[in-house]
Amino acid sequence: MSTISETEIDQLAASQLRSIDQRYTKNRRQLISILSNETKPLTINQILEIDSGLAQSSVYRNLSVLEEAGLVVRIITNDDHAHYELAEQILDHHHHIICSPCGEILDFHLSEKIEKALESSLKEIADNFGFSIDKHRLDLLGTCGDCTD
């Protein structure tokens, strides 16, 4: 779920899209709305199940534009389908648990204490390579309970 209001999301989306010479169309607004109401990243098929009025080709094209504008993030897993979610500038900072066999993705949050320890550890690693971190993403890969059974 989004941590900013729908109005703020719309203003941000319109601004970000203008910055790449694109418009905030009805279909793009609908995709942002669908993603902001979900608690986990979605595949294109899942998006189409939520709103069957959207054309598959339009969803592909518009997600690509929204990704280019920095509003949507594509998450690639071992399955055949990418998953999409709103960018962290709209959502809060979080990480993912990804099931390798089925491709299911779940979001999770770390406590502030653990997040700070992780950031400190990652900074130490980056410093050893002369690397400057802008942000981090943590994906835990494994097997979910449904696939284990």
Image (spheres, rainbow, N blue to C red):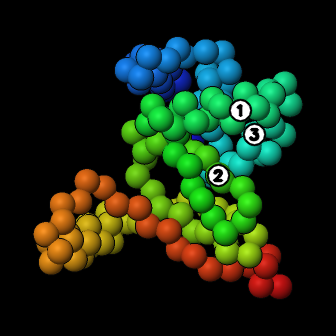
Q: Residue at horizontal 61%, vertical 46%?
A: 84
For residue 46, above or below residue 139: above
Mark found first going from the N terminus, 2 or 1: 1
* Residue 109 shows in this picture: no
* Residue 42 shows in this picture: yes
Corner quadrant of residue 117: bottom left
In this view, the mark in front (3 or 1): 1
For residue 78, above or below residue 132: below
Say which element carries label 2: strand
Mark found first going from the N terminus, 2 or 3: 3
- Specify the amino acid type for callout 2: His
Q: Residue at horizontal 67%, vertical 75%?
A: 100
Badges 3 and 1: C-beta atoms under 8 Å apart?
yes
Q: Residue at horizontal 17%, vertical 74%?
A: 129
Q: Residues within 10 Å of mark 1 (few under 14, many from 20)?
A: some
Disc marking residue 16:
none
* Residue nearest the observer in this picture, 21 or 90: 21
42 relative to 112 in the view: left or right: right
Q: Position of residue 34 (x, y in %)?
A: 67, 34
Disc marking residue 83:
2
Disc marking residue 47:
3
Q: How many marks?
A: 3
